Image: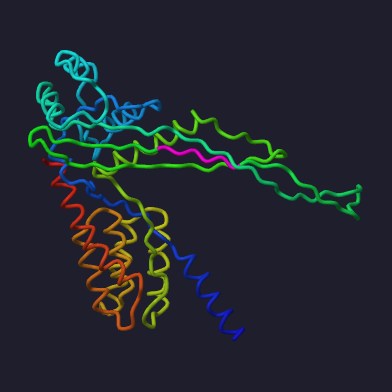
């Protein structure tokens, strides 16, 4: 049993240390209809003591995909002027008919409104035990208690995105964030104030809201295959080893040539070069070629290989997601 435990531990450590390649994948906006309404106005939110509406407005204005702005933000001053002229109370979640009229008058395709909950702070106190030496050589010790405080700061907001043209709700949700902080009498850091904590939570809610409305890139790591799946000769082992070195250095062009040589020298019967070529193509954003290489590797493997199975499924989803993202950006 001990031998098996050590064996599994070694296998886990070896797998955890596999060389990896960073992949950048385009994900579509979670709220698909947001792509139909790219001229946006953000109203002043009700009870907004943390400046959430301004934070959302600023983040949406900066949302860029492939160096292009995804949204166009209408002027807040123009919005307030129209609200004043129409004698509408700007109180966060205004009536749908009113919001549609205001948005239409200023040429917006969508209007974002919201109602912010009261920012809350709750402190609870507890004690922690410490051990201290009684003398310089620490032959004897004694224990004592120090008073500590756990602070929880919470914020939530009801947010709504209205389609001005159709007069219905594109997206509505209550987003909540909280943060926990601990401080004891004998440590050096201080607890954040209610206002400071509220600002951080408002920023987090604004980023989450914008994330749902906009296509964005996701980054993740993909492991390479480093060991031969067939009986490689010395020259073939050298090709694999050097291809991995070039991949690590970002020299995908050189690595690709070595892997193609390895692929041909093994009679195209080894799945390792096909899989690693797939990883290179995926990292370069060439999804169709990556899918081809992953598919060949999948056909060649007899016993299941997790990296190949996962990549074969992942690349198909990545192709679909990128297509949907491109459709959203083109609207």
Residue at 23% x, 58% y is 318
In this image, 39 relative to 284: left or right?
left
Q: Quadrant of residue 275?
A: bottom left
Q: Is residue 65 magenta?
A: no
Which one is nearer the viewer's eye here, 254 or 132?
132
Instruction: Determine the image quadrant of residue 181.
Output: top right
Above-or-below relation of 204 to 256: above
So how many labels did they put on this image? 0
Image quarter (top left, top right, bottom left or bottom right) of the N terminus: bottom right
Percent of width and height locating residue 46: 31, 27
Image coords of residue 230 (percent x, y): 36, 82
Please indicate whether residue 10 sits to the left or right of residue 145 in the image.
left
Image quarter hosting the C terminus? top left
From the viewer's perspective, is residue 104 above or below residue 13? above
Q: Main secondary structure of the magenta part?
A: strand
x, y percentage for residue 325?
19, 48
Please provide percent x and percent y for residue 231.
39, 83
In depth, the one of 245 and 75 nearer the eye is: 75
User: Is the image coloured rainbow, by chain, by secondary structure, or in one colour?
Assistant: rainbow
């Amino acid at each position: 049993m001990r031998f098996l435990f050590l064996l599994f531990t070694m296998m886990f450590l070896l797998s955890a240390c596999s060389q990896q390649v960073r992949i950048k994948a385009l994900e579509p906006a979670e709220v698909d209809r947001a792509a139909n309404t790219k001229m946006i106005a953000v109203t002043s939110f009700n009870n907004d003591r943390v400046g959430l509406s301004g934070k959302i407005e600023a983040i949406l204005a900066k949302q860029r995909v492939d160096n292009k702005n995804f949204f166009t933000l209408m002027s807040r001053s123009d919005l307030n002027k129209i609200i004043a002229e129409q004698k509408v109370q700007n109180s966060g979640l205004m009536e749908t008919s009113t919001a549609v009229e205001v948005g239409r008058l200023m040429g917006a395709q969508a209007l974002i409104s919201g109602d912010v909950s009261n920012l809350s702070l709750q402190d609870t106190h507890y004690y922690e035990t410490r051990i201290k030496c009684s003398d310089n050589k620490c032959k004897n010790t004694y224990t004592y208690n120090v008073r500590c405080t756990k602070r929880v700061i919470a914020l939530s907001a009801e947010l709504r995105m209205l389609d001005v043209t159709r007069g219905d709700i594109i997206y509505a949700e209550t987003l909540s964030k909280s943060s926990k902080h601990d401080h004891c009498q004998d440590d050096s850091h201080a607890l954040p104030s209610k206002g400071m904590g509220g600002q951080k939570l408002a920023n987090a809610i604004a980023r989450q809201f914008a994330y749902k409305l906009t296509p964005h890139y996701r980054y993740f790591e993909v492991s390479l295959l480093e060991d031969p799946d067939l009986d490689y000769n010395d020259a073939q082992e050298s090709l694999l080893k050097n291809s991995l070195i070039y991949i690590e250095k970002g020299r995908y062009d050189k690595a690709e040539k070595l892997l193609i040589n390895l692929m041909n020298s093994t009679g195209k019967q080894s799945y390792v070069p096909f899989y690693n070529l797939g990883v290179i193509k995926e990292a370069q954003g060439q999804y169709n070629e990556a899918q081809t290489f992953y598919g060949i590797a999948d056909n060649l493997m007899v016993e299941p290989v997790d990296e190949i199975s996962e990549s074969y499924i992942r690349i198909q989803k990545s192709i679909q997601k990128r297509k949907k993202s491109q459709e959203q950006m083109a609207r």
